[in-house]
Image: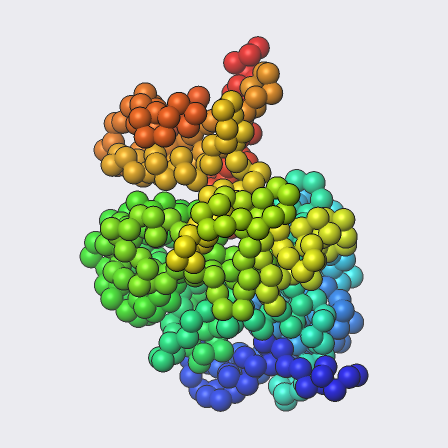
């Protein structure tokens, strides 16, 4: 093995060192149970050795089907420690979609939370795997915790090399061929450095899936001698109670969940003064609603913009969250140190400040490629630059603003409608709580602008009033051809507005109307 590879240390080894520095400190909290740093560290080493006894090792894929629990973090660390690729399934996908992913990444071992044992049976009937390992007694698989209990907790050096694939994250896996995004062990270490550090150890609340951004942030928290409080799922009342009870300093939310948190009646009388950083991202946020959040929680909001393909790209820090500057709130902040961003037109030419084009990114965090999809990799990753598929612009002060996804942009007679711009406008109405805009093709295959709106409590604004507002502010091109109301927007498993589902519903209604 080359000397550079021998001296390389993974994020797991760095975190195990941090856990070993003060083994008695509480580090994970879940359902009233408190796990110390030493207990977590020992479990990782024991579990890693147990995985080896099952034929799992460097270059193999371990897939997690598990909820938010201390054992989930330990299992990921153990698998990565011995050089495995880790793929963490979203729990709310269908069994068919999960099975397609399990099969696609050539899973050697499926590690199952006992709470998901029935689903594991469904998945493995569709996609058999060599080993099923359960995080405790379960209806299927071998008890990995029991195996681990018989192993040594003595530390050992990890097996991973810098260029090995550390993580496979999936997008677009609900239909068709899953799109697995591969990041190496070398790249994974850079994620820690993208998150600003505090002088005091953080106390992070995880109330969204560990398979998403909250899991990466949990790694940074553990590396900084902090404590991670785990909730099984997002519930605004439970999250608010945990913030007060556990004196939470750090929290990650997708914008739709942030809106639910601040709109909940308990938010008005819950002590959230411990919060130092409330990070949001993952999908577009409404400047109007973010201004509301600042007034509710104080100057602690921070927006992170990034992609699994490109890593962390930019940050809008708390000092830039000015409720009187909606243009600044609309931005994704300033590009991170060590990250290059170019805005390019359809011919690949760099555009000047203010020019709208595709956001292209180059840094040490960009993906290795898509899992076994070389043609797609070559399409997205060109000459060391990730072509994000996002449309945006840089202003003269260096702030990056994302206008839309290229695929979400609606092509109408007379030009383009940027969906997030229309959503932002609709959300400025005092009786609108949230909105989602998307395009649907009509019988002539022309795209029509559709908007689904959630009224604020007690609101009675009607569709025509909103259309009139849009026409007055942005002109007839932006006026929705169809505008409907709903009690709540459907969300994906990651917590983003599910525009695919909304589009399918609208297409079905349109088809039924033509009959």
- Which quarter of the figure has residue 156? bottom right
Q: Residue 154 placed where, x, y %?
A: 63, 89
Q: Is residue 205 above or below residue 159?
A: above
Residue drawn at 66 percent across, 76 percent down: 81
In the picture, measured across the screen, residue 114 lies left or right of residue 276, that is: right
Q: Is residue 376 above or below residue 58?
A: above
Which of these two is toward me, 377 or 258? Answer: 377
In the picture, measured across the screen, residue 43 lies left or right of residue 429, that is: right
- Which quarter of the figure has residue 161? bottom right
The total of numbered circles placed on residues is 0
In the picture, measured across the screen, residue 57 lies left or right of residue 485, that is: right
Q: Residue 448 placed where, x, y %?
A: 50, 24
Residue drawn at 23 percent across, 63 percent down: 271
Q: Quadrant of the C terminus?
A: top right
Q: Residue 496 placed where, x, y %?
A: 48, 46
Which of these two is toward me, 155 or 116? Answer: 155
Q: How is the image coloured?
A: rainbow
Q: Is residue 439 above or below residue 317?
A: above
Q: Residue 198 placed where, x, y %?
A: 38, 76
Residue drawn at 71 percent across, 83 percent down: 4
Q: Is residue 226 visible in the rendered structure shown here?
A: yes
Q: Is residue 145 above or below residue 107?
A: below
Q: Is residue 402 visible in the rendered structure shown here?
A: no
Which of these two is toward me, 68 or 445? Answer: 445
Q: Quadrant of the N terminus?
A: bottom right
């Amino acid at each position: 093995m080359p000397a550079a590879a021998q001296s390389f240390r993974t994020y797991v080894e760095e975190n195990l060192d941090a856990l070993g520095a003060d083994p008695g400190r509480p580090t994970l909290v879940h359902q009233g149970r408190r796990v110390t740093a030493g207990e977590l560290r020992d479990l990782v080493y024991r579990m890693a050795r147990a995985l080896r006894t099952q034929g799992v090792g460097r270059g193999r894929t371990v897939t997690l089907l598990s909820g938010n629990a201390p054992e989930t973090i330990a299992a990921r660390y153990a698998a990565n420690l011995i050089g495995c690729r880790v793929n963490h399934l979203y729990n709310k996908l269908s069994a068919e979609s999960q099975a397609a992913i399990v099969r696609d990444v050539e899973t050697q071992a499926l590690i199952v939370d006992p709470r998901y044992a029935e689903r594991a049976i469904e998945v493995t009937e569709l996609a058999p795997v060599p080993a099923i390992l359960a995080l405790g007694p379960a209806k299927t698989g071998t008890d990995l915790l029991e195996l681990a209990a018989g192993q040594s907790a003595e530390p050992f050096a990890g097996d991973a090399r810098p260029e090995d694939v550390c993580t496979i994250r999936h997008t677009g896996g609900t239909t068709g061929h899953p799109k697995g995004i591969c990041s190496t062990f070398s790249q994974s270490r850079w994620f820690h450095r993208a998150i600003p550090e505090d002088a005091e150890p953080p106390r992070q609340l995880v109330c969204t899936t560990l398979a998403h951004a909250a899991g990466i942030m949990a790694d940074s928290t553990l590396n900084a001698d902090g404590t991670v409080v785990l909730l099984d799922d997002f519930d605004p009342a439970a999250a608010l109670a945990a913030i007060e009870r556990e004196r939470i300093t750090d929290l990650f939310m997708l914008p739709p969940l942030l809106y639910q948190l601040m709109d909940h009646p308990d938010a008005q009388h819950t002590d959230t003064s411990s919060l130092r950083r409330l990070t949001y991202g993952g999908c577009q946020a409404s400047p109007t609603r973010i201004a509301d959040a600042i007034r509710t929680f104080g100057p602690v909001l921070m927006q992170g913009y990034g992609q699994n393909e490109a890593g962390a790209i930019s940050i809008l820090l708390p000092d830039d969250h000015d409720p009187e500057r909606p243009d600044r709130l609309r931005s994704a902040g300033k590009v991170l140190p060590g990250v290059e961003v170019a805005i390019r037109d359809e011919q690949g030419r760099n555009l000047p400040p203010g020019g709208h084009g595709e956001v292209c990114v180059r840094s040490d965090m960009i993906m290795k490629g898509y899992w076994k999809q070389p043609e797609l990799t070559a399409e997205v990753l060109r000459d060391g630059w990730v072509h994000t598929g996002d449309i945006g612009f840089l202003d003269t002060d260096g702030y990056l603003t994302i206008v839309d996804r290229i695929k979400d942009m609606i092509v109408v007679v007379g030009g383009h409608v940027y969906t997030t711009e229309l959503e932002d406008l609709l959300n400025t109405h005092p009786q609108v709580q949230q909105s989602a805009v998307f395009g649907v093709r009509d019988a002539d295959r022309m795209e029509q602008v559709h908007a689904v709106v959630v009224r604020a409590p007690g609101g009675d604004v009607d569709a025509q009033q909103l259309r009139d507002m849009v026409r007055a502010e942005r002109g007839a091109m932006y006026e929705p051809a169809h505008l409907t109301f709903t009690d709540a927007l459907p969300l994906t498993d990651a917590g983003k507005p599910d525009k695919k589902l909304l589009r399918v519903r609208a297409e079905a209604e349109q088809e039924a109307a033509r009959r």
